[in-house]
Image (tube, rainbow, N blue to C red):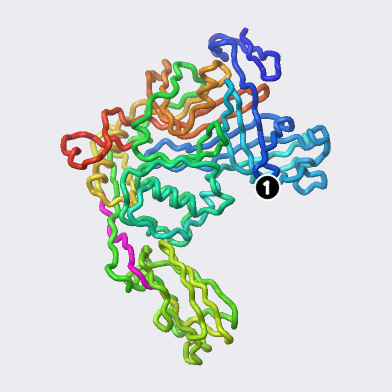
Amino acid sequence: MSKLLLAGGGFLSLASGSGSLLLEEEGVAPSAFVLELEFSAGVWTDVRADAVGALDLKYGKWGSGPTDLVADVGTSTFSLDNSSGNSGGLQGYYSPNHANVRSGFAQGIGIRVGITYGGTTYYKFRGRVVDIDPLAGQFREQHTLCQAVDWMEDLSRFNARNLAPQQDQDSGSLVTTLIAAMPTAAQPAAQSIDAGTESYAYALHDMGSKMSGRALAQRICQSEFGQLAVIGDTTQGGTVRFFNRQHRRQQVVAARLNNRMDRLEAASTADLAINRAIVAIHPTRVDPEPTKVLFSMAIDPETVRPLVPASTSVTFWGTYTDPDNENQLVGGVDQVTPVETTDYTMNRVSGGTGTDETSNFTVVATFFATTVKFVVTAGANDAYVTKLQCRGRGVYDDTPLELESSSTQDYGERSLTLQMPYQSSPVLGQAVADFLEDAYSDVGDQPTAVGFLANRSDARMTDALAREPGDLVELTEPVTGLAAAEAFINGVSLTLGPGILVRCLWHLSPNVEGGPYFKLDNGDLLDDGNLLGYF
């Protein structure tokens, strides 16, 4: 019989032997676990004394395929004692609508989870509480169930339409621009952004007016074949991390699990196989002069035009389209400040047959990558907007160019099309297609998840707390036949139980490189039959 040391003293007995919880050592536990809430700005208060039951958290991405590049929304769930037995001695202490509610406890409050082990505190989750559910009834548990989300939720809800067009910027710069455009309250606690591997002539010209920040991040990552995640750290938690496509090829094994796991997903399956890879690059065409009408309000005389009341301002938004194909979204650069009568007209009559009021109006335009915002201010009289347009140089994505690589396999055809929206190099596009087919055509064992009890040993506890998305791990397991199989951590799930039991699950993607690969500095080198080290 083995024992697990509990943080508060005492031991938990664990049976050893076949089919049971086999310990490498006597067992270890963190020295501290904090569940902190931000009751006032910048001030973190530990409410661990009021926590009941287990705390679950997860962050990163759960998919294992080559297009799973942007993290999913991370979550943390926990319960707080809402009875008079809590630290405040008040029933309803964690009920937002109760007279006894703890000051500052409400939806949107900041949260972070820290675990101290070996003298280091690892902040494994940071976000904000979005769901608070006090269990009703004096004869029930009197617990408040809470769910928190990480920064990826803010990115998912952010409307990216206000971003300016970008020229000659790399993917790292585009990610930085995207983050900087988000509201102050949605700024991440910290960020670490790799520089992109090349610059794009034009970017963000394909967003429209409703693209979320996460969808735009996916387009940026696909163009680079980079990855975006929120990772833990030892400073404050919640670091936004952008990896360029060279990051993975530079990693060394950070953790080795040799038959020390109690969950392993490593199937030989064609579901992850690709033997026909199609990569679509998107060269752009740009108007030579800023004379193209990128947006125009409908001019049908029978249309009821918008009325702007006297001495008031009204805001209008427009989305750029190709005037020769109104269903085709375009970008815009070098837009022209609206000119009276040329770009806007106002009239007392909706159809434009009344008194002209154009000279009594002002129109201020703010130009973005694929949208324009007009602020129209009326003079002393009501009037209808009978003309409103935006001119500039259009940025067109006319015809994507597809590059392909394929092979014949016993499992039949498994194809993937990868869009690289801001990439225009056919040499690089072909190299990516070759890489995808070469790397993913094998249906050998593909580790996609591994789980273990961190309390088994010092090594396992350190792995559970220190390893983050982007790290490379090695797995050996005799039943499946895995022998020093390498995989990258995509996502992390932790369950923190009574006595600070720490159960860890890593979501993985196989290390498909195999090597040797090199950084693409010169496309001519591909003529030697070498493969692109794309990750």
For residue 519, which quarter of the picture? top left
Q: Which residue is mark 1?
A: 107
Residue type beneath disc 1: Gln
- Where is the N terminus found, in terms of image quarters? top right
Residue at 31%, 50% in the rendered image: 423
Magenta region includes residue 395: yes
**Residue 469 in the image, given as x and y percentages of width and height:** 46, 33
Mark 1 secondary-structure assignment:
loop
For mark 1, does the 10 Å Cα neighbourhood hold few (<14), some (14 to 19), or many (20 or more) residues?
Answer: some
Magenta region includes residue 392: yes
Q: Nearer the viewer, residue 334 or 524?
A: 334
**Residue 87 in the image, given as x and y percentages of width and height:** 79, 33
Q: Is residue 168 above or below residue 347?
A: above
Q: Nearer the viewer, residue 233 or 3?
A: 233
**Residue 225 in the image, given as x and y percentages of width and height:** 35, 42
For residue 201, which quarter of the picture? bottom left
Q: Nearer the viewer, residue 278 or 72?
A: 72
Q: In the rendered structure, which segment of residues is drawn in magenta?
A: 391-402
Residue at 37%, 29% in the rendered image: 251
Magenta part mainly helix, strand or loop?
Answer: strand
**Residue 218 in the image, given as x and y percentages of width and height:** 42, 47
